[in-house]
Amino acid sequence: MNAIETMDLTRKFGSLTAVDNVNLKVTEGEIFGLLGPNGAGKSTTISMLCTIMKPTSGTAKVNGYDIVHEPGQVRGSIGIVFQDPSIDDKLTGRENMEMHADLYNVPRDVMHSRIDEVLQLVELEDRASDYVNTYSGGMRRRLEIARSLIHYPRVLFLDEPTLGLDPQSRDHIWSYIRDLKKRENITIILTTHYMEEADELCDRIAIIDRSRIIAMDTPHNLKEELKGEIIILQTNNNDRLVDKLLETELADSITEINGELNLKVKNAHTALPRIVELAVSNSVYVDSISIREPHLDDVFMHFTGREIRETGGRALTGMGARIRGSLK
Amino acid sequence: MITPVLWLVIFGSGLGFSLTIPGFNYQQFLLPGIIAQTLLFTAMFLGISVIWDRQFGFMKEILVAPIGRVSIFAGKMLGVGTSAMIQGLIVILLGFLIGIPLSLYAVCLAIPLMLLITVGLVCIGLIIASFMASLESFGTIVTFVNMPMFFLSGALFPVMNLPWWLKWAFYVNPLTYSVDALRSVMINGWHSILPLEYNILIIVVFDVVTVVIGTYAFGKRQ
């Protein structure tokens, strides 16, 4: 059975379409990632799936319940960790848990054992009696994850679970998420704009850009689809080398990231000597050169022609714009 | 809590020396007015908690829980209402402390009345909060509603002696009847504007209307 199935899910805000005819299926027990830049429509999609927002048209089924007609049943069967903090920091960790358990009709006699259990899972049992305003950002996030599990949801939504956390807390939360999937076999939907997060955690990924799903597959297959490798060059004259490269057919695409040229080529081992030769014969000095396998960043770039970055709509340099114009 | 003290003790005794209302002392006359004022200000102001909850994201956690919108509104109402009632009771206590003649029997009658009055006032606060996005705009609008309601309620002076053109402004204000009802039970021999039953009826109608509008507005806006 599908844990989630959306049918032409659409949401408009005035003239702006935030989510445009999204169709996706998530199988039970899967970690599914919605990946895209800020403002792509990830959170709006999640909000509709958890029945906070009504779709403008289309609908979806979560755990077999319709989000438009059976919002109550949907809410009872899912857990959510929102992008923004949603914990009452004037209560202790345990009080937050108890309140949540009450809201979700967890029977009183099993409530306390379950709270202990989920607190243990996120290693917060020692701090449970402290007020949440004494917690660090990572601890609050873990508490929110623990809270969303008290009522044993079958589907868990994580909206940017590691946004704004330090790398250590991020690793911590990643390992909880993996653990959780193994132990409870629940379906997890997470949104993120961190490529490595999607790559590390997700069984399947949907890449969302400008309100639409533009690709959906396993991280591995998405990367395979690029059919190539990336050569990274540092030179003293990127502009001239790019001009010369464009005259040849050596690279499938060229982008400049932080002063480094990223060339996507079919076979790095045969392309490399020619590229170096081209550089030398045009008296471009090559500082360094390296080869890597494609990342999800490259996949995103491949599908959208843009880079995914924290700021979302990062202004392209004249150079970048020229490359995109001539080569995509 | 300092506001009612200032009103009752300073304003009350100050004006009490220069103004005579036959049969009562001014502070005794003022006490029910200040109780109503305290209920009004606390209930309205605490509507802000809705905006707090929304801004801190806590409202989302509540909204996504498998509970009805009506119970969320009712919960907010009970919470804010309790705070307002506690404030009101403190004012009564304050009345005892500064020696305003007050029988225990009168207090027992006043408390259920205060409960009735609080319901409607809390709802107004929550309705305003439902429509406001920011804390600042809430503050502005609440003051804009609070102050006229307070000054046009007869909390500070009797309504009966006013010219007709001003009277109607008092008569459309539900708080006028709340103050009048409180005075009927707290002051012996008070000549009320309307008989107590009619006052209570008006308050109840006001409560029902605001609860219905409040539940609707709250469900719509969150």
Image: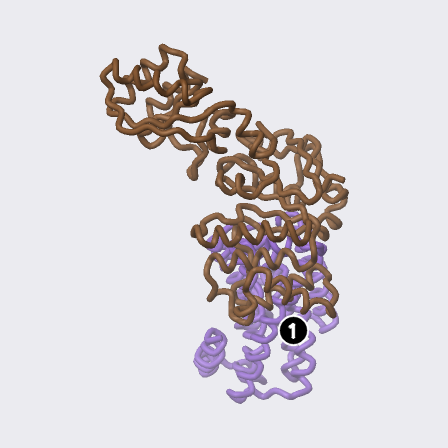
Chain colours: A brown, B purple
Position of A91 compared to B75: left or right?
left
Q: Amino acid at mark 1?
A: Met
Image quarter for residue B69? bottom right
Asked whether residue B213 appears in the rendered view, the answer is: no
- Of residues B40 and B131, which is closer to you in this image? B131
In the image, what residue occupies the spot 64% across and 53% down?
A: B63
Position of B187 compared to A70: left or right?
left
In the image, what residue occupies the spot 66% across and 88% down?
A: B104
Q: Which residue is mark 1?
A: B114
- Of residues A98 and A251, which is closer to you in this image? A251
Image quarter for residue B215? bottom right
| Position in image of residue B120 (x %, y %) | 65, 63
Q: Chain of mark 1?
A: B
| Position in image of residue B53 (x %, y %) | 55, 57
| Position in image of residue A313 (x %, y %) | 43, 32
Position of B183 compared to B51: left or right?
right
Asked whether residue B193 appears in the rendered view, the answer is: yes
In the image, what residue occupies the spot 55% across and 52% down?
A: A175
B64 in relation to B74, above or below: above
B27 in relation to B58, above or below: below
In the image, what residue occupies the spot 36% across and 29% down?
A: A290
